[in-house]
Amino acid sequence: MDQFTIFGLAALLAVCFKVLILFQVRATSQISTAFVIACMALIMQNALEFCGYITFASNPESATLFLHALIIALYFVCGSMVYLCAAIAGSRITVQIGYLCGGSVAVLTLLHLFGFSVVGFHRTGYSIISDPGPVYFLFQLFAPICALACIAFLLRGLVSVDSNVAKRCRLALIAVMPLCLIGIVVTIIRAMGFNSSTAIFMPIASTFLVWLLMYEARGDIVAVKLKWRFIWSIIKYAKDTSIDEWPELTDRIQLIEAMRMCGNKRNQVAKMLKTSPSTITRKCMKYGIDDASVSISAIPRKI
């Protein structure tokens, strides 16, 4: 199995993961709609990567068509990511940003179709390199500008007075940063005259981004944080707990972690755990949990 086949299979695996993720999100808000658009652009990119890598050795003519379509898909990925980050940050000009990105992508696509951006492709070592046309520099500028715009929108959202906006921007920044850094670094390396490939790293980074932002688009990120905290607490304290104490230990840990995440607001805890406030109060009394102990104390090793 040669390198291009491995790269193609990696892209195909990324397509499968993204399709599964996409089916779990419905476009019911501006953020979820922007997420669906970005996810579809990334799926198109990975699918064309798969076709291009798999056919390059056996059918160069078909591979060239797939690779030209891949470059166009990258235009859509860049534009859709800026629109998504603007929506996550709650920007007042999100709609205008969408129009601007759409117009830019349309112009770059037309230039590409008329042969002004990329004129062909050739193999160099383990990567496929595009042969630049007269205005290829526009794509070299467009990609890093979009990456920097994504980071700028999310950094601005981090200092928002709305805590919900700040939290989702923090999450999105973690998700977007690997993809943006890979794009910026590869663009710089190629601009300096060196060959560089994103064949493995880009599908991994984009799949990580889609997986993490899926929970934000569905509004489930709080539940995910609770699950991770719950699992970590179980791992930490399970070794000192006998089997017959496990049911109460897991119940107590879930309650304490939910209290911490909700700032000791029992109505919110009840909503998170899908129960009633009176049940939360009863369990707090049963386990001797009060607001102060949740804020400053560790979970006891013994119940």
Image (tube, rainbow, N blue to C red):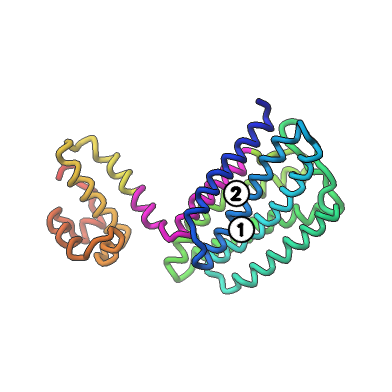
Cα separation, mark 1 vs mark 2, equals: 10 Å
- Residue at image coords 23%, 35%: 239
Taking depth in this image into account, of 49 and 224 the one nearest to the observer is: 49
- Asked if residue 216 is among those painted magenta in the image, a careful observer would answer yes
Residue reaching furthest left? 286
Residue 249, image x and y in percent? 20, 45
Main SS class of the magenta portion in the image: helix
Numbered tag placed on residue 114 in the rendering: none
- Residue at image coords 72%, 61%: 105
The three-letter amino acid code for the residue at tag 1 is Met
Tell which tag, 1 or 2, sits nearer the viewer: 1
Question: Is the C-beta separation of discs 1 and 2 under 8 Å?
Answer: yes
Q: Circle 1 — which element?
A: helix
Residue 107, image x and y in percent? 78, 62
- Residue at image coords 75%, 52%: 140
Question: Is 185 situated left or right of 165 in this image?
Answer: right
Residue at numbered disc 1: 81
Residue 39: image quadrant is bottom right
Q: Quadrant of the C terminus?
A: top left
Residue 290, image x and y in percent? 18, 59
Residue 145: image quadrant is bottom right
Residue 167, image x and y in percent? 44, 61
Taking depth in this image into account, of 14 and 91 the one nearest to the observer is: 14
Q: Quadrant of the N terminus?
A: top right
- Asked if residue 191 is among those painted magenta in the image, a careful observer would answer no
Residue at numbered disc 2: 179
- Residue at image coords 68%, 42%: 49
Residue 130: image quadrant is top right
Query: Could you classify mark 2 by the number of other residues whose Cα lies within 10 Å: few (under 14), some (14-19), or many (20 or more)?
Result: many
Question: Is 66 situated left or right of 270 in this image?
Answer: right
**Residue bounds of the magenta highlight:** 200-228
The three-letter amino acid code for the residue at tag 2 is Leu
